[in-house]
Amino acid sequence: MMNETLFMILAFIAGILLGILFFLGLWVTVKKVVKTKIPSIWVFVSFFLRVSIILIGFYYVSEGSWQRLLVCVLGFIIARFLVGHFTKLMEKKEFLKKVQHET
């Protein structure tokens, strides 16, 4: 019982880490795509790498247990909101820095 609780906590943390990796990777990709001459390659390669890493991560974290997979996906979804909040703050900082620099 104690071991399973520990594995669930670790699966949740792993889900958060996988989500942070996935969504920060997406954010970086979007920032790169608008500045590059060949955006389709960036989008394809980024998508392939991010999805591959996430699926492999889910596979190893779950170890065949749908409960662990569910907890891991829950952590992944929570990370989406954390990264969204973090990236909004980063964009706001960059915008304010740019405005201050122009004045």
Image (cartoon, rainbow, N blue to C red):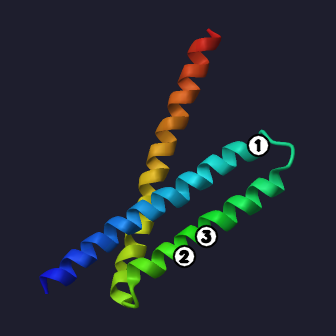
Circle 1 SS class: loop
Precedes in sequence: disc 2 or disc 1 = 1
Q: Residue furthest left?
A: 2
Which residue position is annotated with label 3?
51
Q: Count neighbours of disc 2 (C-alpha within 10 A) and say few if under 14, some if 14 to 19, many if 20 or more.
A: few
Cα distance, mark 1 to mark 3?
21 Å
Q: Kindly identify the residue that appears in the image at 71 percent across and 44 percent down.
A: 32
Which residue position is annotated with label 1?
34
Circle 2 SS class: helix
Whether tag 1 and tag 3 are in contact, CB under 8 A, the answer is no
Residue 61 position (above or below residue 87)? below
Q: Evaluate whether residue 80 shows in this view.
A: no
Q: Nearer the viewer, mark 2 or mark 1?
A: 2
Task: Specify the quadrant that holds the N terminus.
Answer: bottom left
Whether tag 3 and tag 2 are in contact, CB under 8 A, the answer is yes
Q: Kindly identify the residue that appears in the image at 67 percent across and 43 percent down.
A: 31
Q: Kindly identify the residue that appears in the image at 49 percent across and 51 percent down.
A: 84
Task: Specify the quadrant that holds the C terminus.
Answer: top right
Circle 3 SS class: helix
In the rendered view, does 50 fall on the left or right side of 83? right
- Residue type at mark 2? Leu
Precedes in sequence: disc 1 or disc 3 = 1
Cα distance, mark 3 to mark 2?
6 Å
Q: Count neighbours of disc 1 (C-alpha within 10 A) and say few if under 14, some if 14 to 19, many if 20 or more.
A: few
Whether tag 2 and tag 1 are in contact, CB under 8 A, the answer is no
Q: Residue 55 carries which label?
A: 2
Where's residue 53, x and y in %?
56, 68
Q: Count neighbours of disc 3 (C-alpha within 10 A) and say few if under 14, some if 14 to 19, many if 20 or more.
A: few
- Residue type at mark 3? Val
- Residue type at mark 1? Val
Q: Evaluate whether residue 27 shows in this view.
A: yes
